[in-house]
Amino acid sequence: MSNFSLWLVLAGILLIAEITTGTFYLLMVSLGASVGALMAYLGYGLEIQIGAAAVFAVAGSLLLRNRSVKRSKNDKQNDLLDIGNKLEIAHWNANGLASVQYRGATWAAESTDTQPVTGLHQIVDVQGNVLKVKSISTHA
């Protein structure tokens, strides 16, 4: 079996693994193996094939990482859209959390007040799927 064929088989195996796991990093490694296959097809030596595959896989992974970091900053800005919104909390669990419906999904709510109370609350922060809320109920 030629180097070209081996690179293509490796690229195919990595592509299947990427599809089953859902990570784009394996896709970059699979594309790197495809670059290795291209180098083999063009007649370059094994060192060049491995080097080109590695450079492409690393560069692609770094590009993905940088995009995900930028996306995380954008997601944090999207969280700012939630801050200030109001929601009703009817019951607090014994662990100090409440389960609330917000934007069509179930979220955990955690009170920033010293003693959680039921009633109307305002979102002051978002940490993952936990809404940090403070009471704004008018009853005393």
Image (cartoon, grey):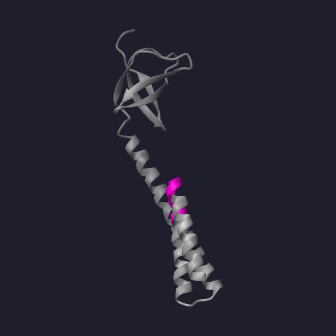
Horizontal and vertical percent position of residue 69: 49, 55
Give the residue at x 60% y 77%.
Answer: 6
Judge whether residue 31 can be spotted in this image. Answer: yes
Q: Nearer the viewer, residue 51 or 63?
A: 51
Up-down: is 61 above or below 5?
above
Up-down: is 5 above or below 128?
below
Can you name the residue that lies furthest to the right here?
A: 47
Up-down: is 32 above or below 134?
below
Give the residue at x 58% y 71%.
Answer: 10
Horizontal and vertical percent position of residue 111: 48, 23
Total count of labels: 0
Up-down: is 104 above or below 24?
above
Can you name the residue that lies furthest to the top here?
A: 140
- For residue 35, side relative to residue 133 (left or right): right
Q: Nearer the viewer, residue 81 or 56?
A: 56
- For residue 1, side relative to residue 68 (left or right): right
Classify the position of the C terminus by image quarter. top left
Q: Is residue 29 magenta?
A: no
Can you name the residue that lies furthest to the bottom here?
A: 43
Q: Nearer the viewer, residue 14 or 100?
A: 14
- Magenta-highlighted residues: 19-27
Give the residue at x 52% y 67%.
Answer: 28
Instruction: Say which quarter of the image contains residue 100.
Output: top left
Q: Nearer the viewer, residue 67 or 39?
A: 39
Q: Main secondary structure of the magenta part?
A: helix
Horizontal and vertical percent position of residue 75: 42, 47
Give the residue at x 42% y 14%.
Answer: 118
